[in-house]
Amino acid sequence: MEEKVSESQPADTSEAANGEGIKEKIIGVLKTIYDPEIPVDIYELGLVYDIDVNSSGVADVKMTLTSPMCPVAESLPPEVESKIGKVPGVTKASVEVVWDPPWTMEMMSEAAKLQLGML
């Protein structure tokens, strides 16, 4: 399959590029937060549904939990919010727990499945 090559463009120093850089740092932080029952980080588990960083550095994260009865349902979202709030460039962080779509094991990354011996 032939790869398409786009026209050369100057390096993007726009606010959008800065937001993507902050988003990558947030993902790095999320990969340090582990589910207490499954020895895999919440990002690779597929618990993080969306990360949005606006031009002012406000980071909004939508995540879920493995179940509504998750033992860390009260403590995990504030921990995530606190840690992403410390990422350089983030001026404010908010975490919204959503239940739709419900989390399933299919949402885990291949790395998570491999770590758990599922591949």
Image: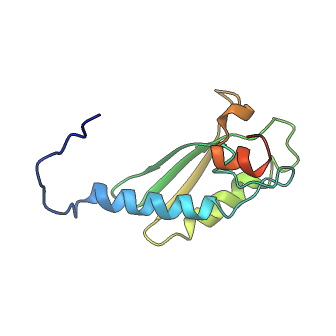
Q: Is residue 112 above or below residue 104?
A: below
Q: Residue at x 42, y 69 (%)?
A: 89
- Furthest-top residue in this view: 101
- In the rendered image, residue 6, in percent from the top left (x then y), is placed at 16, 45
- Quarter where residue 23 is shown: bottom left
Extreme residue toward the front, this view: 1
Q: Quadrant of the C terminus?
A: top right
User: In the shown orientation, is residue 47 left or right of residue 37?
Assistant: left
Is residue 55 shown above or below 7? below
Whole-percent x, y for residue 107 in the image: 66, 35
Q: Residue at x 67, y 40 (%)?
A: 108
- Figure quadrant of residue 63: top right
Which residue shows up at 62% across the image and 59% down it?
30
Residue 65 in the image: state x and y as whole percent: 74, 41
Q: Residue at x 80, y 50 (%)?
A: 74
Residue 32 horizontal side relative to residue 51, left or right: right
Instruction: Give the x, y percent position of residue 82.
Output: 64, 64
